[in-house]
Image (tube, grey):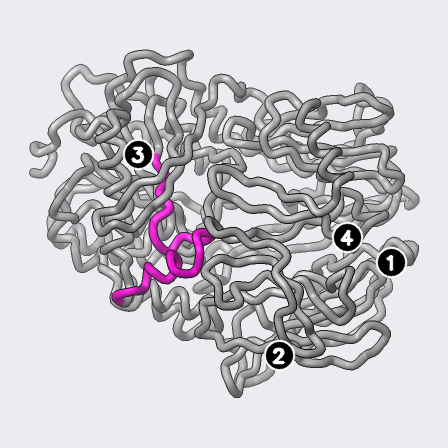
Amino acid sequence: MYRQGCIALLLSLLVSEVIADPYPLDYWARRSAVTGVSLSPDGSKFALTRILERGGNPIIELYDSDNLEAEPLRIDSSPMEILPGIRWIDDDVFLFNARQQVRDIIEGFNQGVYEYQNVKYDASKKNPIGRIRQDFFSVEEVLPKKKNKILISIQEGIPDGLQAVSSTIRPRSYWEYDVKTNRRKLLMRGKIALGNIQFDSDGNATHAFGYDVRTDEYTYHWRPKGTTEWREMYRQHEDSFEQFYPVAPDPVAENHFLVMAHNGYDKVGLWSFDAENQKFSEVLYRRNDVDSSFPFSHSNRLSNSDDIAGITWCKDKCHREFFDAQEAALYRQLEELIPNADQVRISGRSRDGNTLVVTNSGPRDPGTYYLIRKGKVSKISGAKPYLEHDQLAKVEYITYKARDGEEINGYVTVPNGEGPFPLVVMPHGGPYVSETVDRFDEWSQMLANNGYMVLQPQYRGSQKYGLDFYKSAFINGSEAGRAMQDDKDDGALYLVKQGLADPNRMAMFGWSYGGYAALIAASREDQIYQCVIAGAAVTDPDMQMDYYRYRIEGSAKIEQLTTWDGAVSPIKEVAKINVPMLIVHGDNDQRVPPEHFDKYIAELDRAGIDYQKLILEGADHFSNTLFYHHKIALYESILEFFGNDCGSMSGGASLANR
């Protein structure tokens, strides 16, 4: 069949020169050994989550900041799984979350198999570990001026007739919670029109957003300081693609708010908004090339809790623009101190400002944690300490023209060695997300470590490149499977033209929307790929559209319906498939339910199309449900498929066995 038409091995030939042998797949499949280092307010202790053995669940380790060699206190929450994200409340109290699988199968779209629990560690208690037997809550604010008190929120039920309202605007109730006594006091209950309420560090409500079900508009309200009166500041129809998001009160202009918004411009900027007069006052920061990202807080959230230190923007990498000169100087100093500094972040700082936990991350650093105390810099651990910086691949930012002239950007992970390389085009999911290279990407690095160049194209519809580029995915209805697909192929052809990629060794591998794109690639008539791998793929856009049509509202619904209404449908293109394919799906996928996989496999069988498949038992759609055994199976299948089922040549070595 079509295998006879494959003109060369895809990904089965070794690159001519590499720096070192590939890492064992075991190194990639392990979840991060260390995550979430969190500093106590007085700086005397820090806690982190650690996985001690491959395939194991995280535990918490508690360290003395002045004696890193001492054996830490270890905390387990079995049979529940501890999640990253330790939140110190006081010098001897912190909270964390845990989850437990309570069902064998999903209960439908966006209804997973886990339930969640808040857990408390209190060193002053005889039994310091205790699950908080209340509704699962989110911590909104630590209240530094109120000892042992925090502000929490709990998602409320939905009034009859409004069950379709998006979870982003479901009302929440807000409580002051005493972490010592486990008592809580109701502050206020949200409602649909005031579904999400924001507070300052003193626990005062400042602004809120909700939804007007009569007009299908998002509504934004504010509270004049010292009052309990809610006033409307802005409203926007759910069909609008423009952004309006109040961040915090403007510290230098009374009754003004810092707002991320388009305000008629193509790129999102930071504005001062006059809430009293319901109008934009002035632009504080805006770029012409990319959207501005959200402002970041002062590094000392305990002493400067309401201060904004600057704003970020991301293109080739993420950059900071500082409003605070002292913060800028501190970060410059840290970038000189930290080895292989890339994305340096102060993730924790003591109340007095003298002790810091600093995190470095980037394409070649899965995350490395440092403690700075008493003038000394100490390395705590790396997230994946067995992966060496110099053996990981560099990532380059490229710009190229699509066939219709649209300018497309992309990230290219370049293997160590000499090209031209076999190429894997790896489109992101979403599709309306912002993808950057300010963090370690396990899949692209695993592939590059085995000799493959990886292209992550920022096809039209990708966010951060402005409103026009985002909306270009909808110009002719849905461009899914059409111009959005061309953008991916044109990136591959660009790399071929540059002499970096081998045109006879190219594949597409994607997950979620990226899996959909891989299925579309398999049936294109002007075929440029030798094979595809589709993970968690939307195979029937009509079925996916119905999930969004009936189960959510608001902008998320508009985006998804626009994506799938009129999109090219893989299940209707099965007869056109002309390359080998591997199809992967988790049997507990709540976002793209397994019936997508089942219907597509049945259609392949009816058409007599050859394929490989991998079912990840117990896996959901999201990366935090892919455990060690899932990833070992996935990575082995990927490399074996690329080596043996994608135009292999007699005597060709499988990369899985290198």
**Mark 2 or 1, nearer chain start:** 1
Say which quadrant the N terminus sits in.
top left
Q: Which residue is mark 4?
A: 307
Residue 192: numbered disc? 2
**Mark 2 or 4, nearer chain start:** 2
| Residues tagged 2 and 1 counted as in contact (Cβ below 8 A) | no
Q: Secondary structure at mark 3?
A: strand
Q: Using the image as rendered, state which of residue 573 and residue 369 is in the foreground.
A: 369
* Mark 1 surroundings: few (<14), some (14-19) or many (≥20) residues within 10 A: many
Residue furthest out toward the bottom: 214
Give the magenta range: 455-476
Residue at figure coordinates x 53%, y 37% from the top left: 438
Residue 580: numbered disc? none
Measured Cα–Cα span from mark 3 to mark 2? 45 Å
Residue 149: numbered disc? 1
Residue furthest out toward the front: 282
**Mark 3 or 2, nearer chain start:** 2
Measured Cα–Cα span from mark 2 to mark 1? 27 Å
Kindly identify the amino acid type of the residue bearing the numbered disc 3: Val
Kindly identify the amino acid type of the residue bearing the numbered disc 2: Ile
Instruction: Indicate which label's residue lies in the foreground, 3 or 4.
Output: 4
Kindly identify the amino acid type of the residue bearing the numbered disc 4: Asp
Residue at figure coordinates x 57%, y 40% from the top left: 319
Measured Cα–Cα span from mark 3 to mark 1? 51 Å
Residue 468 lies, with reference to residue 98, above or below; the image says: below
Q: Using the image as rendered, state which of residue 442 and residue 543 is in the foreground.
A: 442
**Mark 4 or 1, nearer chain start:** 1
Q: Which residue is mark 3?
A: 424
